[in-house]
Image (cartoon, rainbow, N blue to C red):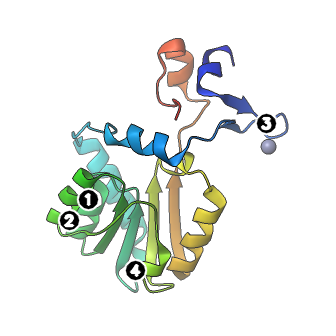
Amino acid sequence: MPYYAKDYLVQCQNCRFVFAEKIPSPQELEAYYEGYGRNDYLSPLIVRRYEELLQSWEKYRQTNRILDVGCGIGYFLETAQKMGWEAYGTEYTERAVAICAAKGISMQKGELNPDLYAPESFDIITSFEVIEHINQPRAEMVKFYHLLRKGGAVYITTPNFNSMLRYYLKECYNVIAYP
Ligand SMILES: [Zn+2]
């Protein structure tokens, strides 16, 4: 993977999983996220996709609570609210937390702290393009497990290293970058 040495990426020879061998410090991450994700445009296509996902999750609705870990400025949860869900989110920056709170989303700043919620109280836990940012992904999954009600659903997305975009853009591909 000649293009990715700068981002400390390595690949498992057994399962081809690609990951960063260098783990950034919390200080490095905080500095990075202060300037992160300032693209505040929501396309109608994405909204339609969110609605589709939520529609397919109707069968899980019991507690009526949904948690989005790393919710950005709340686009997904806003859509969930319109469909009647009680929305909870977590995010790192003051700015994102303030924007989401103004939308009526119950927010928690920083890393997910399961002690702040009732155990097994969520029907759905989502985390879009977040798991690859987390230094202890296994511990994070354990938190999800404790917060999700039995029979609820977890939905996680992460970048696809085999995406056509990466082959097409080569050196200019910037979806995966240290830290
Ligand atoms: Zn492997």
Q: Residue at x 42, y 69 (%)?
A: 57
Residue type pointed to by label 1 = Val
Residue 129 position, x and y percent, is 47, 47
Query: In the picture shown, does residue 46 fall above or below 63?
Result: above
Q: Residue at x 53, y 31 (%)?
A: 178
Q: Please give the residue where the numbered disc 3 appears in the rendered image.
A: 12
Secondary structure of the residue carrying tag 4 is loop
Residue type pointed to by label 4 = Arg
Q: Is the distance from the Cβ of mark 3 to the nearest ligand 1 atom less than 8 Å? A: yes
Secondary structure of the residue carrying tag 1 is helix
Residue type pointed to by label 3 = Cys
Q: Please give the residue where the numbered disc 1 appears in the rendered image.
A: 97
Secondary structure of the residue carrying tag 3 is loop
Q: Please give the residue where the numbered disc 2 appears in the rendered image.
A: 101
Q: Relative to residue 176, is residue 93 drawn left or right?
A: left
Q: Relative to residue 135, is residue 86 drawn left or right?
A: left
